[in-house]
Amino acid sequence: MASLTNAFNQNMLDRIMPPFGTKRANIPVWNEGQKMFIISEYESATGHLYYRGVRFCDRIVISEKVGLYYNWTYIDAIELYVFNGTRLELVQTREYKKEFRDEGLIRRDSETMVKNYLNGVVKSQGLNMSSQQIEVQARELVEGCYKSFLDADYNARLMQILPAIEQR
């Protein structure tokens, strides 16, 4: 039994961290420091690394396009998506001019984007919702996207959302 357990563990390790020259299994990478999944990455012809990270809850997806240039990290864009059934719809985008990536800035801008979206929907639908209510909802939604995947109480149902996000 011990050898079967060792083989299983080695096989699993080879899939997620293969030896050099072997392709890694298509498994999303969780970045605990940034509280997001790294969905894709590539290296430019000049040697700079770019990646797309996503964080999400059951209502919204926040996508970051990030670049690594020598010894600093900058933000290229933030995109806000909402679900339409199982499909994602882009509802807000914010582009930056090679601005240093700052977590506080990302959170504030994400909240602002959610508020803008909610305000637009409320106004277009003729609904009655105070700006304080919208602000609280926006803050709670963004905060929900920062829940750590490694927490014991992470909602396992959220993992069903990840394949839909990866396709986008």
Image (tube, helix red, strand yellow):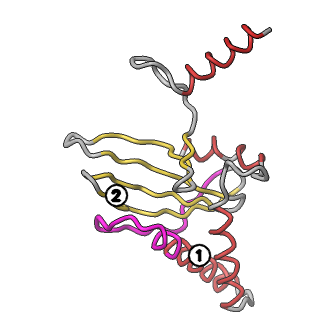
Dot 1 crowding, Cα within 10 Å, few <14, some 14–19, many 20+ = some
The x and y percentages for residue 166 are 56, 43
Residue 15 falls left or right of residue 150: left
Residue behind mark 2: 73
Tell me, yes or no, whether the highlighted magenta stretch contains residue 82. no
Above or below residue 143? Residue 19 is above
- The residue at the point 66 percent across, 90 percent down is 131
The x and y percentages for residue 43 are 30, 40
- The residue at the point 67 percent across, 49 percent down is 149
Q: Amino acid at mark 1?
A: Tyr
C-beta proximity under 8 Å, tags 2 and 1:
no
Toward the front, the furthest residue is: 2
Report the disc number at residue 117.
Answer: 1
**Closer to the camera in the image, 124 or 110:** 110
**Does label 2 or label 1 sit earlier along the sequence?**
2
The x and y percentages for residue 156 are 77, 46
- Image quadrant assignment for residue 94: bottom left
Mark 2 vs mark 1: in front = 2
* Residue bounds of the magenta highlight: 87-108
Report the disc number at residue 43.
Answer: none
**Closer to the camera in the image, 123 or 132:** 132
Q: Main secondary structure of the magenta part?
A: strand
The quadrant of the picture occupied by the N terminus is top right
**Closer to the camera in the image, 15 or 115:** 15
The x and y percentages for residue 18 are 49, 21
Q: Amino acid at mark 2?
A: Thr
